[in-house]
Amino acid sequence: MKKLLILGAGSAGTMVANRMIRMLTREDWQITVVDPDPVHYYQPGFLFMPFGIYNEKDVFQPRRKYIPAGVQYIQEKVEIIEPDHNRVRLESGSLLDYDFLVIATGANIHPEETPGLAEDEWGKSIHTFYSFEGASALAKKFDAWQGGRLVVNVVENPIKCPVAPLEFLMLADAFFTQRGIRDRVELVYATPLPGAFTKPIASKMLGDMLESRRITVEPEFMIERVEPEAKKIVSYDEREVEYDLLVSIPLNMGAAVVGKSGLGDELNYSPVNKHTFLSEKFDNIFILGDASNAPASKAGSVAHYAIDLWGENFIRYTQGKELEEKFDGHANCFVESGYGKCILIDFNYDQEPLPGTYPVPGLGPFSLLKETRINHIGKMTFRWMYWNILMRGRGLPLPPTMQMAGKHKPA
């Protein structure tokens, strides 16, 4: 019997387990999932918690609820991966051998990596919404906050959900306007990017939206340190940005065990073929979701589309056939803009977001690079789809690769 071992039971790992239990014959394969955390978080929901749109109960479920029957689930920490021996050592000392390994250990924030960030003011005048605990604490902070200079800072890219800081700022604009204190709140975005986003057309549109909402962008701000007593962040070129309230997107890194096992880069992301997700070092290891160094967005849509293509590709591979380089980096992201509206962007490794309609050319119902109410409804519906369709391993009737039909380049 062949053994498929999956490390991580987040979005990618859970989708793989649910797909593979259907695609592999149970008589020939044993599937095991390892993850130490009993809770599965709907991470896109963290964005909404500080503004009272979601509460804590809206964003988590027990992991076991989504591990399918027939898959062994081990709730334990991985001590080290030993790829030369095709085995994994658990914290208890137990050894798990494998024929094929899927690393889906995700990415997490590391505020301790930035001097001054995770010190006495963490959770007081410095917050984050990139964790469940951080989003909960920020919600409590906003309940009592009466205004001042709110600075959102991205420490370094890549980060999970690259558009989330922009969404946070636009939701903050709407939130404080509705509370009647927007004139007492100054919003600033300090980003290492040269503009609001990485792609020129989308960056121009999103930058204009921030400007229209009186949100200041401090571009190419590479933070070197936080001075919490002085309430300012300082860049490597010694620019200073003062704040009353700092909302940080700390350094994102892959799981420490990936680096410890010699499978990661300097940020513990594992190098892969960006079209197949096969490890560059070992021919029986795949890295899916946020754990890889593929230059795609670290977003749920990318994991979903990648796994749509990966499943059949993996079956071919186990039959001795060559992997097909199918995945093109396809991502689509709903960018919440506040006031019950949202923008949708659709792009891949080579093609930047363009205006148009999605998913049906000329019909939509969603509009690309346009702020609409229908897009917002799509964004808010996604949580139900996440729990009931994607985490159950079911596919959506959407092409996993990017389609140019229905899109056009602006003049």
Image (spheres, rainbow, N blue to C red):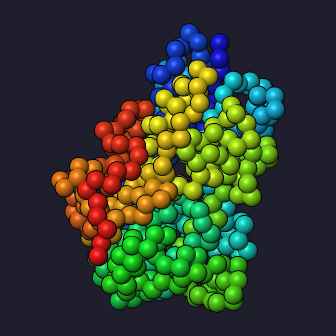
Q: Which of 119 and 168 is in front in this view?
A: 168
Residue 352 falls in image quadrant: bottom left
Residue 386 drawn above or below residue 68: below
Residue furthest out toward the top:
27
In this rendering, the count of numbered labels is: 0
Q: In the rendered image, which quarter contains the N terminus?
A: top right
Q: Residue at x 68, y 48 (%)?
A: 270
Q: Residue at x 58, y 81 (%)?
A: 220
Q: Can residue 123 be seen in this view?
A: no
Q: Can residue 296 be seen in this view?
A: yes
Residue 103 pos. (x, y %): 64, 39
Q: Which of 388 and 203 is in front in this view?
A: 203
Residue 32 drawn above or below residue 103: above
Q: In this view, does 155 lie to the left or right of 53?
A: right
Q: In the rendered image, which quarter contains the C terminus?
A: bottom left
Q: Which residue is drawn at 59% across and 52% down?
A: 294
Q: Which of 10 and 61 is in front in this view?
A: 10
Q: Nearer the viewer, residue 310 or 50?
A: 310
Q: Residue at x 41, y 83 (%)?
A: 215
Residue 217 pos. (x, y %): 48, 83
Residue furthest out toward the left:
363
Residue 111 pos. (x, y %): 66, 66
Residue 72 pos. (x, y %): 59, 22
